[in-house]
Image: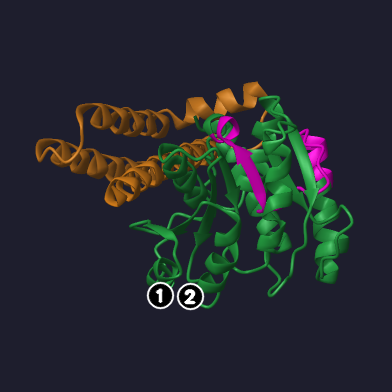
Chain colours: A green, B orange
């Protein structure tokens, strides 16, 4: 079974070598989508052993993931793992993420920071941003998952073929969850660890996500 | 009366400018017709401003006809901004698709 890890990266020269090296023991191929970085992300990722695709202009994380999915599917991937390039996820948790798919229990697996494993959340993220995102996700999107905004996920070939990521920026995380529920895919959640090196998405980012989701509802 | 004459002169100026753009083929026929109808409507509204005043009173709005026209113009502008936003979002989506195709083809 071919497991491919898709890593969207933008100006990640500090972390990309470590991330690719960490990930490679657990997957058949690591595909780095360099979203038109201005630093040495591409050559470093290539040197670390990744397959590198480079966007000719910056398009955002969602667009990079879809590029990675399409390339991986064309090259025979059975399972696609999405993994961040900023070294906040643990590569040793990839086997836990793909296990439900290999065992046929799930088509898509979402990582969750709220299922027991320790995560060093910034205070406002834990007590304000995440509860609000959870509430919005459950109420308006009909997504009943413990973690509404997590970039660590694994998709079977079937799931990747059926879910096209249209939101090119950060709203893709919610979009993938919504589409998984709408298409009645078998969904599983797996506890994961996140190590925050920086704050990540702020409350204002949450409003941009909502705006992008609304626009994508109107545009076909 | 003087204000009406000034407004009419301004509108005529824009219609002449529009016609020049059409002659130089800078705009399409449909776009020309769209803007021409807009300026002609504006011209009619200025000429018949008194009648619009009474119509506004009959409809029960407070304020004069010119205020009513400004409200309509603001509404039209909001709608145009909305349409523009949708068009930009569509272009953006298409651009992402082109970038994706180029990226994957470059890798082959």
Q: Is residue A147 magenta?
A: yes
Whether residue A137 sits left or right of residue B40 in the image: it is right
What percent of the width, then of the height, locates residue A179?
65, 32
Q: Nearer the viewer, residue A41 or A166?
A: A41
Crowding near pointer 1: few (<14 within 10 Å), some, many (20+)? Answer: some
What percent of the width, then of the height, locates residue B40?
32, 29
Crowding near pointer 2: few (<14 within 10 Å), some, many (20+)? Answer: many
Q: Nearer the viewer, residue A43 or A54?
A: A43
Residue range (magenta)? A135-160
What element does badge 1 sit on?
loop
Give the residue drawn at x 66%, y 25%: A183
Q: Quadrant of the N terminus of chain A?
A: top right
> Circle 2 marks a residue in which chain?
A
Give the residue drawn at x 82%, y 37%: A144
**Direction bottom: furthest residue:** A14
Q: Nearer the viewer, residue A205 or B45?
A: A205
Residue identified by numbered label 2: A13
Whichever of labels 2 and 1 marks the residue nearer the N terminus, that label is 2
- Residue A40 - label: 1
> Circle 1 marks a residue in which chain?
A
What percent of the width, then of the height, locates residue A84?
60, 60
Whether residue A165 sits left or right of residue A95 in the image: it is left
Give the residue drawn at x 53%, y 57%: A7
What percent of the width, then of the height, locates residue B50?
48, 30
Determine if residue A138 is in view. yes
Q: Quadrant of residue A142?
A: top right
What element does badge 2 sit on?
loop
Q: Is residue B72 magenta?
A: no
Q: Nearer the viewer, residue B3 or A164?
A: A164
Determine if residue A149 is in view. no
For the residues beneath circles 2 and 1, the answer to whether they share a chain is yes
């Amino acid at each position: 079974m071919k497991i491919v890890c898709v890593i969207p990266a933008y100006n990640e020269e500090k972390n990309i070598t470590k991330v690719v090296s960490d990930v490679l023991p657990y997957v058949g191929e690591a595909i780095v989508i360099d979203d038109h970085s201005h630093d040495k992300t591409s050559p470093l990722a290539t040197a670390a052993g990744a397959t590198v695709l480079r966007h000719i202009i910056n398009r955002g994380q969602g667009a990079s993931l879809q590029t990675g999915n399409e390339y991986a599917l064309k090259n025979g991937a059975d399972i696609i793992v999405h993994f961040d390039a900023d070294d906040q996820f643990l590569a040793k948790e990839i086997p836990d993420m793909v296990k439900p798919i290999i065992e046929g229990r799930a088509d898509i697996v979402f990582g969750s920071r709220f299922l027991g494993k320790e995560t060093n959340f910034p205070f406002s993220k834990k007590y304000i941003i995440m509860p609000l995102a959870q509430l919005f996700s459950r109420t308006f999107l009909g997504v009943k998952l413990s973690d509404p905004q997590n970039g660590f996920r694994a998709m079977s070939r079937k799931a990747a073929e059926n879910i096209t990521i249209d939101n090119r920026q950060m709203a893709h995380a919610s979009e993938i969850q919504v589409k998984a529920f709408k298409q009645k895919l078998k969904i599983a959640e797996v506890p994961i660890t996140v190590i925050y090196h920086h704050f990540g998405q702020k409350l204002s980012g949450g409003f941009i996500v909502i705006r992008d989701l609304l626009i994508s509802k109107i545009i076909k | 009366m003087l204000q009406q004459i000034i407004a009419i002169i301004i509108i005529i100026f824009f219609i002449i400018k529009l016609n020049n753009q059409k002659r130089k083929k800078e705009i399409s026929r449909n776009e020309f017709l769209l803007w021409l109808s807009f300026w002609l409507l504006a011209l009619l509204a200025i000429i018949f401003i008194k009648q619009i005043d009474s119509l506004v009173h009959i409809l029960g709005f407070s304020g004069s006809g010119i205020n009513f026209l400004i409200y309509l113009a603001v509404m039209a502008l909001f709608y145009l901004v909305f349409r523009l936003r949708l068009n930009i979002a569509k272009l953006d989506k298409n651009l992402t698709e082109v970038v994706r195709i180029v990226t994957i083809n470059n890798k082959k």
